[in-house]
Image (tube, helix red, strand yellow):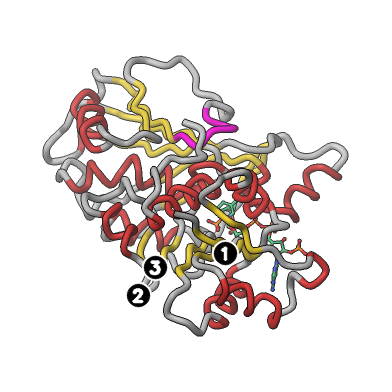
Amino acid sequence: MSISVFIDGAAGTTGLEIRERLAGRVDIALVEIDDARRKDPAVRAEALNDADFVILCLPDDAAREAVALIDNDRTRVIDASTAFRTAEGWNYGFPELEPGQQAAIAEAKRVSNPGCYPTGFLALVRPLVRMGLVPVDWPLTVNAVSGYSGGGKAMIAEFESANPPPAARTYGLGLAHKHVPEMQKHARIEHPPIFMPSVANTYRGMIVEVPLPLHAFPRRPSLHVCEAVLSEAYRDCALINIVEGDAATVAIEADAGTDRLTLRVCGNPETGQARLIATLDNLGKGAAGAAVQNLNIMAGFDPIAGLTV
Ligand SMILES: NC(=O)C1=CN([C@@H]2O[C@H](COP(=O)(O)OP(=O)(O)OC[C@H]3O[C@@H](n4cnc5c(N)ncnc54)[C@H](OP(=O)(O)O)[C@@H]3O)[C@@H](O)[C@H]2O)C=CC1
Ligand SMILES: CC(=O)N[C@@H](CCC(=O)OP(=O)(O)O)C(=O)O
């Protein structure tokens, strides 16, 4: 079986990465448009309605516009932007997050790809919340550092033209980052997490951390129990690895250039303080890898076809 796929925003950072992963696949025919007219709504509307699947790699407003341009019942959509991640009628494209989620994505017409930071946060926290180990009303915090490709073409140009670029800088200081509602909704927690993102002078890769005072939780879970819960939750997930044992350091490059997501439960067993750590590539499982995984699932292909494990 072969499917047709149109990538709207194929000249952007995420779009190019998706194209790279799909190029050469015999089961996929890419719908191409003239580069000079890639922002022309009439040209886009035709491609959006011709394709079996469209993958939107656009700013939020352009993604909303693209969805509005689809006027048939057949075309199925994967959106990489923030526009629909908490929207009714959209399926959250994180197949490993909940039991039954992959099956729901397989049937869905509209799938919203998770944000890169929420991918790390949710993978670490959701199984522990679901098991009742982290109370739903706990005020969680998230610390994270991303490569600068996370900010798309504009941030890449900014870092690559600055002389010298910052080694690292923190942002989101007003605690209203666009990923917070998505984190709260899909973790199924009562309060928005305090989210402290930074960007480093490296192209790709990210570290997402959640500190947990396990000793203060009603069930006082050990580090070992948390690790066992994550291992069980992702037992059959080809892209998610739980690395056991002590790590002295974790590098932002750990999963850069792959579509993997690696989880670690670090900390001090004596004090009951944990550091949950996720590493991933913002353009891999954080964007393009996840979009291709969702496409594979929706089309009935091997879920990890074309991906780097
Ligand atoms: N970069 C990342 O790590 C991640 C990105 N995302 C999300 O993916 C989406 C794309 O991000 P990213 O690839 O980084 O961004 P880029 O800025 O690199 O790419 C966006 C592309 O969209 C094009 N574009 C803008 N407006 C329109 C329009 N009206 N019609 C057609 N094309 C348009 C741009 O054109 P032009 O080339 O002229 O600028 C550009 O090529 C965003 O919503 C982002 O939030 C999600 C997870 C991670
Ligand atoms: C370093 C950097 O700036 N990162 C982006 C997030 C990239 C991403 O995940 O895109 P979505 O917002 O579509 O999820 C930011 O913080 O806005």
Q: Which residues are magenta?
A: 255-260
**Relative to 307, is 140 above or below?**
below
Mark 1 belongs to which amino acid? Leu
Disc 3: which residue: 86
SS at mark 1 in the image: strand
> Which amino acid type is marked by label 3?
Thr
Task: Give the CA separation, mark 2 to mark 3.
Answer: 7 Å
- Mark 2 lies on residue: 88
Which residue is rendered at x = 34% and y = 27% of the image?
242
Q: Nearer the viewer, mark 1 or mark 2?
A: 1
The residue at label 2 has a CB less than 8 Å from ligand 2 = no
Note whether ligand 1 is within 8 Å of mark 1.
yes
Dots 1 and 2: beta carbons under 8 Å?
no
Q: Amino acid at mark 2?
A: Glu
Quarter of the image where one finds residue 209: top left
Q: Quadrant of the N terminus?
A: bottom left
The mark that comes first in sequence, 1 or 2, is 1
How far is disc 3 from disc 1 in space, using C-alphas?
16 Å
